[in-house]
Image (cartoon, helix red, strand yellow):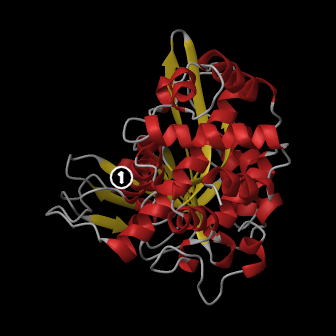
């Protein structure tokens, strides 16, 4: 079996595209691993095809201008790649933005926390500069819940810009826990009914020390739990939550995984800021394309680290290389050396794309005890 054919069959299980569209997507996906830049001219040049370079470039242009994407189907594909619904998880919300000329590109992303790098599930292209509004955040959450239900969500994590009375009230009404950082100059009501800045509760902390308040406070119209920590740079980290928890800083710390995601999609991986796409519906498509490539890389790196050659842990306690980059290098090297012509290696790459990491055996095959055989048999 050819790698292209196997990937097309997997994607056809989820995406209602004809053969021409599937082939174009897969060829573009493999080209991305060769050049590691999302630039249509570079991708067209790296595609293996008998067509002329101009023809390949126009084909990519047509894909991003004409192909209809069912983003609920894409979300289901991503969730199934990791089998997320078997366990509970945290969600994290953030946005990434940059400028191309005078055009602002601003992507609000809802992702699932996963072992050091968040996995995007839904995203919204903001037709503006700056922060998202409360309606946009609620809309993303509603879409996620409509597709995957509420039960598996342990909570949502977000940084300082993701506040607002309607947003916080909606989360509490849906019984969704949240841990959100706030600005130190926000006003709150004390037990005595006085209005003060929240920093007053934590200004006397020494660097590295933290305090978790034992009773709720009123922030706007919300009754919330407050926690504060003095960071090494003398900044205050102040977290609000609708839950009383013993480890709010550990939970909130998982939010950083979405920053790792954006770094991987940008300079440490696919250089998505190199794109020349500026129309919003095309940007949404290209983010979907990069997300699928990111998931494949991350799963491959996780498998290689676990079964083939564990990455070294450096003095600062982190791996010498991210699992995403480890997998990206492996797939890229395999394609460059044409090793995927070997049937065993082809099947390994297909299983690493298709199967959740817990299903992958040490030889890279998807033959674990609880593997859904009917699912991957239809591919292989």
Residue placed farthest to the bottom in the image? Answer: 369
Q: Can residue 131 be seen in this view?
A: yes
Q: Residue 298: where, in percent of width, then height?
A: 47, 58
Nearest to the observer: residue 353 or residue 52: 52
Count of numbered tags: 1
Indicate left or right for 358 with 254 as reference: right
Q: Dot 1 corresponds to which residue?
A: 237
Q: Which residue is drawn at 50% across and 64% down?
A: 345
Q: Residue 124: where, in percent of width, then height?
A: 69, 37
Q: Which residue is drawn at 46% across and 39% down?
A: 34
Nearest to the observer: residue 182 or residue 355: 355
Q: Residue 136: where, in percent of width, then height?
A: 72, 39
Q: Can residue 118 be seen in this view?
A: no
Q: Residues within 10 Å of mark 1 (few under 14, many from 20)?
A: some
Q: Residue at x 65, y 44 (%)?
A: 26
The quarter of the image holding the C terminus is bottom right
Residue 307, picture quadrant: bottom left
In the displayed structure, 267 sits above or below 195; it is: above
Residue 152, picture quadrant: bottom right
Q: Residue 167: where, in percent of width, then height?
A: 68, 48
Residue 83, picture quadrant: bottom right
At mark 1, the secondary structure is strand
In the displayed structure, 326 sits above or below 32; it is: below
The quarter of the image holding the N terminus is bottom right
């Amino acid at each position: 079996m050819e790698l292209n054919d196997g990937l097309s069959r997997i994607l056809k299980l989820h995406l209602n595209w004809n053969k021409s569209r599937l082939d174009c997507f897969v060829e573009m996906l493999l080209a991305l691993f060769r050049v590691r830049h999302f630039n249509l001219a570079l991708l067209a040049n790296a595609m293996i095809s008998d067509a002329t370079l101009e023809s390949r470039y126009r084909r990519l242009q047509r894909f991003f201008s004409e192909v209809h994407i069912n983003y609920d189907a894409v979300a289901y594909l991503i969730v199934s790649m990791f089998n997320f619904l078997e366990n509970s998880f945290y969600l994290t919300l953030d946005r990434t933005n940059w400028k191309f000329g005078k055009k602002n590109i601003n992507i609000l992303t809802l992702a699932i926390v996963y072992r050091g790098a968040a996995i995007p599930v839904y995203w919204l292209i903001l037709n503006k500069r700056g922060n998202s509004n409360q309606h946009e955040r609620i809309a993303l959450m509603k879409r996620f819940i409509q597709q995957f239900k509420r039960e598996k969500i342990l909570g949502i994590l977000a940084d300082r810009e993701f506040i607002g009375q309607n947003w916080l009230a909606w989360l509490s009404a849906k019984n969704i826990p949240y841990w959100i950082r706030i600005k130190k100059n926000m006003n709150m009501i004390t037990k005595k009914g006085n209005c003060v800045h929240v920093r007053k509760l934590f200004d006397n902390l020494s660097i590295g020390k933290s305090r978790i308040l034992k009773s709720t406070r009123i922030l706007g119209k919300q009754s919330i739990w407050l926690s504060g920590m003095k960071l090494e740079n003398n900044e205050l980290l102040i977290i609000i939550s609708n839950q009383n928890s013993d480890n709010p800083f550990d939970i909130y710390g998982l939010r950083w995984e979405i920053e790792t995601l954006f770094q991987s999609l940008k300079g440490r991986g696919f250089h998505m800021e190199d794109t020349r796409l500026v129309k919003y519906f095309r940007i949404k498509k290209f983010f979907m394309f990069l997300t699928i490539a990111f998931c494949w890389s991350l799963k491959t790196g996780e498998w290689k680290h676990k079964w083939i050659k564990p990455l070294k842990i450096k003095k600062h306690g982190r791996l010498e290389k991210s699992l995403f980059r480890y997998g990206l290098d492996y797939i890229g090297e395999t394609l460059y050396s044409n090793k995927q012509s070997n049937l065993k290696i082809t099947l390994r790459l297909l299983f690493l794309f298709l199967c959740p990491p817990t299903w992958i055996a040490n030889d890279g095959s998807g033959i674990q005890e609880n593997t859904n055989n009917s699912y991957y048999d239809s591919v292989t």
